[in-house]
Every structure is written in structure tokens, then in C-alpha cells.
Amino acid sequence: MRCIKCGEKAIMELPRHNSAFCKPDYLEYFETQVERVIRRRRTFNRDDRILIGVSGGKDSLSLWHVLARMGYKTAGLHIHLGIGEYSSLSYEKTLRFSEQHGLTLFTVDLAGKYGMNVTELSRTLRRAPCSGCGLSKRYILNREAYERGFDALATGHNLDDETATLLGNILHWQIGHLARQSPVLPSTGEKLIKRVKPLYTLTERETAAYALLHGIDYILEECPNAWKAKSLLYKDALARIEAESPGAKQRFLTQFLEAAQARLQVGADDYVLRDCVRCGQPTTAELCAFCRMWQQATERAEKRKRYRETASGREMPTLQERF
Ligand code: AMP
Ligand code: FES
Ligand code: ZN
């Protein structure tokens, strides 16, 4: 297998592009893809300050690396989710990367700032960890980007993430989600920061290769809750289709973005944003979804505490005391 650019021995084959590259030409291909997304999708410009959500995984570290290399003004934000050893390791990898490259890193500790980590939140609410985790990440990333005066918020979502989300949204006909599924979500209010996904044309395998070739030390472990997420099933199904028909994933997403998405926009902007009465972040309701979730979690935790205190003082708590 030879590099299609220079004829040297190739180290990376890309069946979906019918091509193969040597190390320098692969790294150039990767940067060109990112550059193209930035230019075509007008994600941000040279003067913008970009906050990157960094998990310590291959995608977000590669994203930070490539944008910093290209000379963009970036800083990272890591949210410590408190999912046991996995979160400690994620933080370590992120911190080490920022120190090695002399980049600014902000950190938010979910339990420290809001009172519970993802595991406690999920137990208290009796909900899958991923739902509270996803909502918390979206909320905190936007809030920190706004409060710290950033112009754009970038995440490391790749082609596999985006196609899995698209498949899930279609399987459940989530029209509202489909209308908003885009590599660039412009700011629709002062406190809603523009959200961008510069790696959305690159696969997981491609970001992993970029990280390895640049010697980026990223966390290899998956989140221990990942097996509960439907997205893995969708990724598996799409991988099988891709193996039979190289390029299918990319066509699925590109054709959705180019041909279908605009048609779903009718009525998508028919909502009025206002400030959440509790935290001031933008929402369509009185309380934002994040504050509603935390209010419910706090109430439940207090109820359980009262129940435990009552139970330890008496032999048999009444039914009302139990619930
Ligand atoms: P995930 O939702 O885990 O697939 O992650 C998608 C993107 O969200 C990552 O590429 C990061 O940009 C961002 N992200 C995930 N986890 C964190 C975290 N703990 N802190 C900051 N950003 C995160
Ligand atoms: Fe959120 Fe796994 S990263 S539950
Ligand atoms: Zn709120």
C-alpha cells in the first residue's frame, strides 16, 4: 500500500476516500479536513476565543492539538464528572496535555460546584447516568463559555458520533433534535454561545491515528456507563454498513445536512428564550432543564435523609414518612 500523494509506504488506509497516506501526508489530510470545516461552515475566525470541552479522550485532545497548531486562540474546559477511576484518569490526561503544550485549562468539579457527581445524581434520580451527565455537560460548557467571555464552544464530536446520533434521532423521529443537529449551532441569544464540531467529517479511527502519530497520551478506557448507551448499538450497526459500503456513513450525514435539514427548520425557531429564574441561563421555561433536574435531585436527597433519620429514631416509619 502506497501513499497516494508521494508514493512512499502508507501507514493509514482510508477506504471511504479510496486513498492511503504516509505519516506526513496523513497529518496534512487531517488538518485540511479541519480547515475545510472551519472555512465552509464558518465555525469561527482567527480573532475568536474558542473554549474546547476536553474529556481527555482522543477526539477532544486531538481537536485541541490541531486548533492550537493552526494558531487559533483556544483554552480547554474539563468537567470532573466523578465517575470513579475513569474520571480521575480523564482529568489527569487532560491536565498533563495542557501542561505539556502550555495551554490554559479550566476545570469544573460537578460535585464540588453543584452538590453531587454523576453517579450520585443518577442514584438519587433513579435515571440512567448518561442523561444527567449529558445535560450537565451541555449546561456547564455553555455557562462557562459565556461567563468567561468566549466566542465559540467547540467539542470533539466526530463522524461516528454524529451519524450514531442521526440514526437515533431518526429511529425515534425526534424532529426537534433533527432540526438542531448541526456541526454549527449559531448563538440565538446573548447567553447562548455558538457551538461547533470541527471534527465532524473525521472518523474515530482517524482521530485516534492523529493522536497516536502526534504522541498524544489520551484515555483509552470507555466510560463505565457507556454500555448502557444506545449510541454504541447504533455505532455497531453503522460500522457494519460502512464495511459493506465504504463512505456510507459520510453520505448519510452529509446528505442529511445538505438536503433534509433545512426542511426541518420550519417552526424550529418559534420559541422565546428567557433567563432561568434560578441561574439566569437561557431557557424556554421558567426554570431551565438543568435547574429542574438539580431541584428534583436535592428534594429527593433531603427526603431520603429525613426518612433515614426518622427510621433510626423509631421502629416502624409510617407509609407517609416513607414516601
Ligand atoms: P461524549 O458526549 O462523551 O461523546 O463527548 C463528546 C464531546 O463532549 C467530547 O469530544 C468533548 O469535547 C466533550 N466532553 C465530553 N466529556 C467532557 C468532560 N468531562 N469535560 C469537558 N468536555 C467534555
Ligand atoms: Fe457521562 Fe459516561 S461520560 S455517563
Ligand atoms: Zn437554570
Image (tube, grey):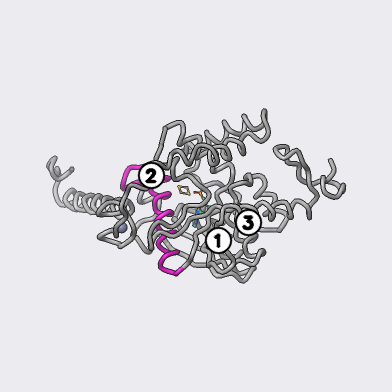
Kindly tell me whether residue 89 is visible in this rendering. Answer: no
Between the residue at mark 2 and the residue at mark 1, the CA separation in whole angstroms equals 23 Å
Q: Main secondary structure of the magenta part?
A: helix
**Is residue 138 located in the magenta-colored stretch of the structure?**
yes
Between the residue at mark 1 and the residue at mark 3, the CA separation in whole angstroms equals 18 Å
Residue 274 x/y as whole percent: 29, 57
Please name the residue shown 69% across and 55% down the image: 31
Please name the residue shown 29% across and 60% down the image: 275
Check disc 3 and report its element: helix, strand or loop.
helix
Circle 1 residue: 44
In which image quadrant can residue 283 be found? bottom left
Kindly tell me whether residue 241 is visible in this rendering. Answer: yes
Residue sitting farthest toward the top:
244
Check disc 2 and report its element: helix, strand or loop.
loop
Where's the C terminus, which quadrant? top left
**Is residue 227 located in the magenta-colored stretch of the structure?**
no
Please name the residue shown 35% across and 56% down the image: 116
Circle 2 residue: 268
Residue 309 x/y as whole percent: 19, 53
Q: Tell me which label, 1 or 3, sits earlier in the chain.
A: 1
Region of the chain picked out in magenta, as a range = 122-149
Where's the N terminus, which quadrant? top right
Circle 3 residue: 62
Mark 3 Cα shell of 10 Å, populated few (<14), some (14-19), many (≥20): many
Q: Is 120 on the left-hand or right-hand side of 259?
A: left
